[in-house]
Amino acid sequence: MRRSLGQIALLLLALAGAAVAAAQEQPRVIMVPEKDPEMAAAIAQGRATLARFWQALDKPGPDEEGFALKVGLPADGGGAEHIWANRIERKDGKIFGTINNVPKNLKNIRLGQRIEIPEPLISDWMYHRSGKIVGGQTIRVLLKRLPRNEAVRLRAILADP
C-alpha cells in the first residue's frame, strides 16, 4: 500500500510570483510513496540549506519575492501531507505561514489559514528571484513524475540549484 510522503501540490505556488494566468489553476497533487529515497534526499537537502532561505527572507534583494516553506503536517489516517505555506514570518522565536494549497488529508487545515510552523516539520523552501524559483528541492524530484508539458513549463522557471 502506498502511503503518502506528501500530497504535493506545486504549480500554484511555483507560478504565484510569476504573474501568469496558470497561477489561477488548481494545483496538481503528486502522490509519493512514504519511503521514496529521492524525495527523502530532497527533503534532507532542503532542510540542510534552510539557512539560505532565512538569509534571503531576512534581507530580500529587490528581485526576490514569493517566499514559501513546505511543511509536513500530520495527515488524517497517518503519515504526513507536505503542503506549501507562504507569507512566512518569524516572530518571537516562532514561524508562521499561510496555507497555500487545498489540503487533501488535513481535516483542520484549510487554504488561506494562518498556522504556526514547527521548524522540524519544514521539508523544503523556495522563493522567486527574477521570476525563477530558488530552492524547491522537492519540486525538482517531481519533474519526472509530471506530464511532459507541465515538467517543461516548470523547468523553465527553476533557477539552477
Image (tube, grey):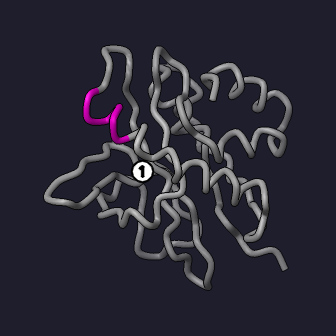
Q: Residue at x 14, y 59 (%)?
A: 92
Horizontal side, residue 111 vs residue 27: left or right: left
Q: Which region is colored magenta? A: 54-59
Horizontal side, residue 7 vs residue 123: left or right: right
Q: Residue at x 61, y 55 (%)?
A: 43
Provide the residue designation for mark 1.
85
Q: Nearer the viewer, residue 52 or 86?
A: 52
Q: Residue at x 76, y 31 (%)?
A: 150
Q: Name the amino acid type tagged 1.
A: Ala
Q: Residue at x 80, y 41 (%)?
A: 146
Helix, strand or loop at label 1? It is: strand
Q: Position of residue 23 (x, y in %)?
A: 53, 31
Horizontal side, residue 40 vs residue 71: left or right: right
Residue 55 is one of the magenta-drawn residues = yes
Label 1 CA crowd tier, 10 Å (few <14, some 14–19, many 20+): many
Name of the residue lying farthest toward the bottom: 77
Q: Position of residue 130 (x, y in %)?
A: 47, 14
